[in-house]
């Protein structure tokens, strides 16, 4: 039986090759700072890469919010992650919240964000670190850092423009406006919008479909998707050739081929 790591402020489950991470600090609207959620997310990301029984990671929030991002009370008090002079504050960012984008960017399996409610500031950025976002009709999204006189310190400007393009990302970031789930879908931020009571069913349906694919090939395919934008075509094709050679020599490939042949014989 697979051992799931014990987390402090989040819940982690594994069923049918789908790991589900639920941010569980509803009292803080699942704020990433002022809680142990940063450690919990990083621990989960590292565990997923080491666990061969995981093919998909779903991230969602408990309660009414997906994540409120940074703890505004700590900002007001210049305490916690926001205390100290310039050098001390910068060091806390590097050793704190910036660990999340680095960890999630390295996750080898598909990540689905099931956005159950407001995703604000760093919470919005967390959702954008996933490969796919499915939102409930209660969800709202806001890159609201500038409204508080700060910048997206967790890499949000890097992720959003890669998701929806520079111009649209620029407008959302510089205005700090909050958008609803419908507009988020129109902009290409979310793939689907579903009623709140159907969110996890929709996320799990997609996760289960992906998790049914051959697991080693799934991880290699995600690596290719991540590598493609930063590589020249010739170099990329060389990597594809090597990965394909690996796939052709995996038992899961022959199992999938034989399954396909069997299905074809019945038609």
Image (cartoon, rainbow, N blue to C red):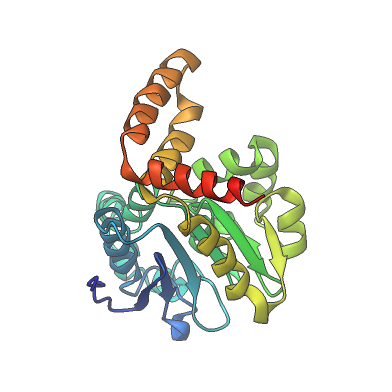
Q: Residue 93: where, in percent of width, then height?
A: 32, 54
Q: Is residue 180 left or right of residue 120?
A: right
58 and 18: which is toward the camera: 18
Q: Residue 235: where, in percent of width, then height?
A: 41, 16
Q: Is residue 149 visible?
A: no
Q: Among all residues in the image, which is located at the extreme top?
A: 234
Dividing the picture into quadrants, the one containing residue 168 is: top right
167 and 85: which is toward the camera: 167
State the residue at coordinates (47%, 66%): 59
On screen, residue 266 above or below 158: below
23 and 197: which is toward the camera: 197
Quadrant for the N terminus in the image? bottom left
Q: Is residue 186 left or right of residue 62?
A: right
Dividing the picture into quadrants, the one containing residue 192 is: bottom right
Q: Is residue 213 visible?
A: yes
State the residue at coordinates (40%, 57%): 55
Q: Residue 151: where, in percent of width, then height?
A: 50, 50
Q: Residue 165: where, in percent of width, then height?
A: 65, 37
State the residue at coordinates (64%, 36%): 166
């Amino acid at each position: 039986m697979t051992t799931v790591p014990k987390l402090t402020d989040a819940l982690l489950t594994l069923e049918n090759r789908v790991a589900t991470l639920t941010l569980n600090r509803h009292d803080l609207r699942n704020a990433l700072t002022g809680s142990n959620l940063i450690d919990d997310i990083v621990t989960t990301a590292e565990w997923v890469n080491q666990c061969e029984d995981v093919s998909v990671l779903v991230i969602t929030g408990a309660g009414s919010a997906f994540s409120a991002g940074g703890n505004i009370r700590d900002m007001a008090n210049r305490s916690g992650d926001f205390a100290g002079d310039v050098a001390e504050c910068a060091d806390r960012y590097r050793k704190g919240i910036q660990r999340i984008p680095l960890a999630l960017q390295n996750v080898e399996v598909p990540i689905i964000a099931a956005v159950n409610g407001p995703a604000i500031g760093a919470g919005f950025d967390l959702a954008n670190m996933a490969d796919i976002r499915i939102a409930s009709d209660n969800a709202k999204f806001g890159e609201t850092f500038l409204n508080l006189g700060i910048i997206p310190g967790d890499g949000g400007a890097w992720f959003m423009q890669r998701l929806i393009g520079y111009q649209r990302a620029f407008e959302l970031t510089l205005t700090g406006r909050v958008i609803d789930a419908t507009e988020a879908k129109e902009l290409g931020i979310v793939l689907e919008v579903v009623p709140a009571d159907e969110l996890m069913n929709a996320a799990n349906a997609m996760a289960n479909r992906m998790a049914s694919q051959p697991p080693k090939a799934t991880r290699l395919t995600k690596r290719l998707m991540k590598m493609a934008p930063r590589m020249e075509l010739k170099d990329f094709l060389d990597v594809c050739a090597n990965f394909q050679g690996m796939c052709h020599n995996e038992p899961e490939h022959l199992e999938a081929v034989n399954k396909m042949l069997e299905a074809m014989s019945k038609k």
